[in-house]
Image: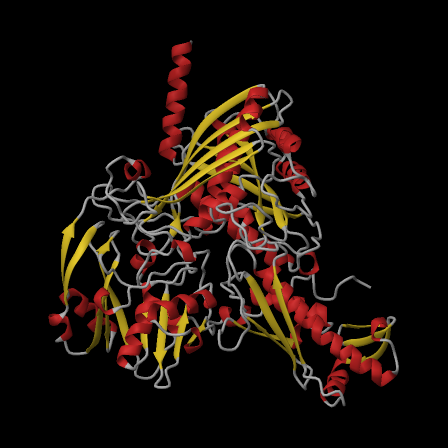
């Protein structure tokens, strides 16, 4: 008999059919009776004081029902991280980027709302603006935010020292120092941001929103509106892609709620594609200075990483970007001596925030590229250099992260073998192979209340209903939770139905971020299923005179020491009419093993229950005439613990790789550095990789069966994005014999690098 009945099987996703036939309901699909339509007035200036907003003409337009400005709202700031909150629902004192929200209109239709926006007159006092990290840090640069905590536009920073870095450098056989630059990137989800608010006479406010974090959204909404959380209900319909951009509360949420409360009618806001590109979050551009010392045998003796990120106009997830970057600069290599310097800098561009891998892609790009450079300096093979420094389960970590399982070395070997490393590395002729490796967390416990709850209900028909606060944003969370419950409870997958992400119905859950859903929410669901299973077995054991410890449920059958005794439907009826009168529900709650939430800003500690690891190997061909890069193949050897649903794991990895390919070769936000206007306003202006750009991929499962996650699972949703850029760039370097330090790697940069290389060769000749 197989070990598992449901786990490890590639069962179809529970939402697959609805999405295929177009029956899935997204926020913008909804239309409520008597609904109004909202539109936001946005600033045309990158930095200006708002002196006056005149709404008189707009109010007179037939069909306009309400208008709000910053003067109407409570001066309550919001944000993801409590101590870094710096945004208002609408601008109160000044605007800080082109697109900042100034006023909002609710009207009988979209056309009227848009016409009203054109009639609002705003008086601005223009202020000097800064659009680069370097300009923002200059002495005398304009202050984007006021306050004693913000000096020289640095909103948050830290320095962490581990070991004795100076001694480590003194003992080093070889030292090199390099500067790397990464650029921004947009999430570009298929579904733009949308929200519908409905305020009832009873005082209850319901918000349907394309969000990743219903409970955090409820909290921010209640605080900014000045009402208690129990009066706010947040429901997440189907979400057409998130990748981190739908973590924050946006003006569309706040203004829909405010205007619904003001008019007593439902109000819908939908961002158009330009707003979804230019007025939401993006990936942080970064400057990384990396100094590393190594012994003669290749072991790292000391490392100093200086990270500066461009946060844009607001903090959003500022503390997380710099701390997560730091944590994932520490793995997957052993670093006995390490210093991390990190700072988040304001600029007058749209704010940046969480995006797949959140900080780790920038950090690992620099470290993994320098790993190849160090190996070359020492005359070592790049795989051998990584193996000699690779962490293993139980390896010490500077910040006291606990590595319970680690498949990194195995992933190195398998990825190298699959790409043909020994045969293809260094062959020249504009073909090359490269690798990149990393680790990532299965959820992060760096804020209070990072946990998940679940309730499992047995229906009298034998069906199973799971209530979870987890937010499925397209990654298949509900499907894998259903698999976990089916396996733990011993019932068939088809019996399980999941109800999710409704703050009035479902248990508290932190939401979807940091790759924590499978481990955090899945574990809670497993515990809830185990709870009700215990009840079932106690009742059945009493009925047949057996010891419940010797019984189990498998494939809808009650077994006693492996022998069939009763089917699940009969068992459910016994529970329903048992004289002990127990409810047919199970409860579970799970928080990551760390005893206290931790962050590098405050102290060190184990930020996650488990850490995934992986290696990507890439083969490329470069056209020396055009500079065009063709990816021949990418292979990902991924340690995701146990693959609960192999097809979903592979789908997540393949999608993550495409995100990484876009960041490395194609996507490059275009800002006018004279006025701060974002010119990447559509998919015509912003180049995304398409299906035609997708290379052949291979996925190798490195199963480590982690003791923390449900049935041994770890994350698989973000990790594979982290090492795509260095794998591709290292392969390009192998192909053309010259390294480009700044992302993205465009044909123009390649042609320039080849010309400089050839010119240098002719001079030396």
Residue drawn where x is 56% and y is 42% of the image:
634
User: Where is residue 418 drawn, in percent x and y?
Assistant: 64, 39
Q: Residue furthest top?
A: 765
| Image quarter hosting the N terminus | bottom right
| Image quarter hosting the C terminus | top left
Image vertical order of residue 273 relative to residue 145, above or below? below
Image vertical order of residue 443 relative to residue 117, above or below? above
Q: Which colour scheme is used?
A: secondary structure
The one of 203 and 643 positioned closer to us in this rendering: 203
The one of 422 and 57 positioned closer to us in this rendering: 57
Residue drawn where x is 67% and y is 37% of the image:
413
Q: Is residue 454 left or right of residue 676?
A: right
Is residue 539 visible in the rendered structure shown here? yes
User: Where is residue 283 drawn, in percent x and y?
Assistant: 41, 48
The one of 6 and 348 positioned closer to us in this rendering: 348
User: Where is residue 348 drawn, in percent x and y?
Assistant: 27, 47
Q: Residue furthest front?
A: 148
Q: Quadrant of residue 100?
A: bottom left
User: Where is residue 673 drawn, in percent x and y?
Assistant: 24, 41
Q: In this view, does 418 lie to the left or right of 258?
A: right
Q: Is residue 483 left or right of residue 233?
A: right
Is residue 739 visible in the rendered structure shown here? no
């Amino acid at each position: 008999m197989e070990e598992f009945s449901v786990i490890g099987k590639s069962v179809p996703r529970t939402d697959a059919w609805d999405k295929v036939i177009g029956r899935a309901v997204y926020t913008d699909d909804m239309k409520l009776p008597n609904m109004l339509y909202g539109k936001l007035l946005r600033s045309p200036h990158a930095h200006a004081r708002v002196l006056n907003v005149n709404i008189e003409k707009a109010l007179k337009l037939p069909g306009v029902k309400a208008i709000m400005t910053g003067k109407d709202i409570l001066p309550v700031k919001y944000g993801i991280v409590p101590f870094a909150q710096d945004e208002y629902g609408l601008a109160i004192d000044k605007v800080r980027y082109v697109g900042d929200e100034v006023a909002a209109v609710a009207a009988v239709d979209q056309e009227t709302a848009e016409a009203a926006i054109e009639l609002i007159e705003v008086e601005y006092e223009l202020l000097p603006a800064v659009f680069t990290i370097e300009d923002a840090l200059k002495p005398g640069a304009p202050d984007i935010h006021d306050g004693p905590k913000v000096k020289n536009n640095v909103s948050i920073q830290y320095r962490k020292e581990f070991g004795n870095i100076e001694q480590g450098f003194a003992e080093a056989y070889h030292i090199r120092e390099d500067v790397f630059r990464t650029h921004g990137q947009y999430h570009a989800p298929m579904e733009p941001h949308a929200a519908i608010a409905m305020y009832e006479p009873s005082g209850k406010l319901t918000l349907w929103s394309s969000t990743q974090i219903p409970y955090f959204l409820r909290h921010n909404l209640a605080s900014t509106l000045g009402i208690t959380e129990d009066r706010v209900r947040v429901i997440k319909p189907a979400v057409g892609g998130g990748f981190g951009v739908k973590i924050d509360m946006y003006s569309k949420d706040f203004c829909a709620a405010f205007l619904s409360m003001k008019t007593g009618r439902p109000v819908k806001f939908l961002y158009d594609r330009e707003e979804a590109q230019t007025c939401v979050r993006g990936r942080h551009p970064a400057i990384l200075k990396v100094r590393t010392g190594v012994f003669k045998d290749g072991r790292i003796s000391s490392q100093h990483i200086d990270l500066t990120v461009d946060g844009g106009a607001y903090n959003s997830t500022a503390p997380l970007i710099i701390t997560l970057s730091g944590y994932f600069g520490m793995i997957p290599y052993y670093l006995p001596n390490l210093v991390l310097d990190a700072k988040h800098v304001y600029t007058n561009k749209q704010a940046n925030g969480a995006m797949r891998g959140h900080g780790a892609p920038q950090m690992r790009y620099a470290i993994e590229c320098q790993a190849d450079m160090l190996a070359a300096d020492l005359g070592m093979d790049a795989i051998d250099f990584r193996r000699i420094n690779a962490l293993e389960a139980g390896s010490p970590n500077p910040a006291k992260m606990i590595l319970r399982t680690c498949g990194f070395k195995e992933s190195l070997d398998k990825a190298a073998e699959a790409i043909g490393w020994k045969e293809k590395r260094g062959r020249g002729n504009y073909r090359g192979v490269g690798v990149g490796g990393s680790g990532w967390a299965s959820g992060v416990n760096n804020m209070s209340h990072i946990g998940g709850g679940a309730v499992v209900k047995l229906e009298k028909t034998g069906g199973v209903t799971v209530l979870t606060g987890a937010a499925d944003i397209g990654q298949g969370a509900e499907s894998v939770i259903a698999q976990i419950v089916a396996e733990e409870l011993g019932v068939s997958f088809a019996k399980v139905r999941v109800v999710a992400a409704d703050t009035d119905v479902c248990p508290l859950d932190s939401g979807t971020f940091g790759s924590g859903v499978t481990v955090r929410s899945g574990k809670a669901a497993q515990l809830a299923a185990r709870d009700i299973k215990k009840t079932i077995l106690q009742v059945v054991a009493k009925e047949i005179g057996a010891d419940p410890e010797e019984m189990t449920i498998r494939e809808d059958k009650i077994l006693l020491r492996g022998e069939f005794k009763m089917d699940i439907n009969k068992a459910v009826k016994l529970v329903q009419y048992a004289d002990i009168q127990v409810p047919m529900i199970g409860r579970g709650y799970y928080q990551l093993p760390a005893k206290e939430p931790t962050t590098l800003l405050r102290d060190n500690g184990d930020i996650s229950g488990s850490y995934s690891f992986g290696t990507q190997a890439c083969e490329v061909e470069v056209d020396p005439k055009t500079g065009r890069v063709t990816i021949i193949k990418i292979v990902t050897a991924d340690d995701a613990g146990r693959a609960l649903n192999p097809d979903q794991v592979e789908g997540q990895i393949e999608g993550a790789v495409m995100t990484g390919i876009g960041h490395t070769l194609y996507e490059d936000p275009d800002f006018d550095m004279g006025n701060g206007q974002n010119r990447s306003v559509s998919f015509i202006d912003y180049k995304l990789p398409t299906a035609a750009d997708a290379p052949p991929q291979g996925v190798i499962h490195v199963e480590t069966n982690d003791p923390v996650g449900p049935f041994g699972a770890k994350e698989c949703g973000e990790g594979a994005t982290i090492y795509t850029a260095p794998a591709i760039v290292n392969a390009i370097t192998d192909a053309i014999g010259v390294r480009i330090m700044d992302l993205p790697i465009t044909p123009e940069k390649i042609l320039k690098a080849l010309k400089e290389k050839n010119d240098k060769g002719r001079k030396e000749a």
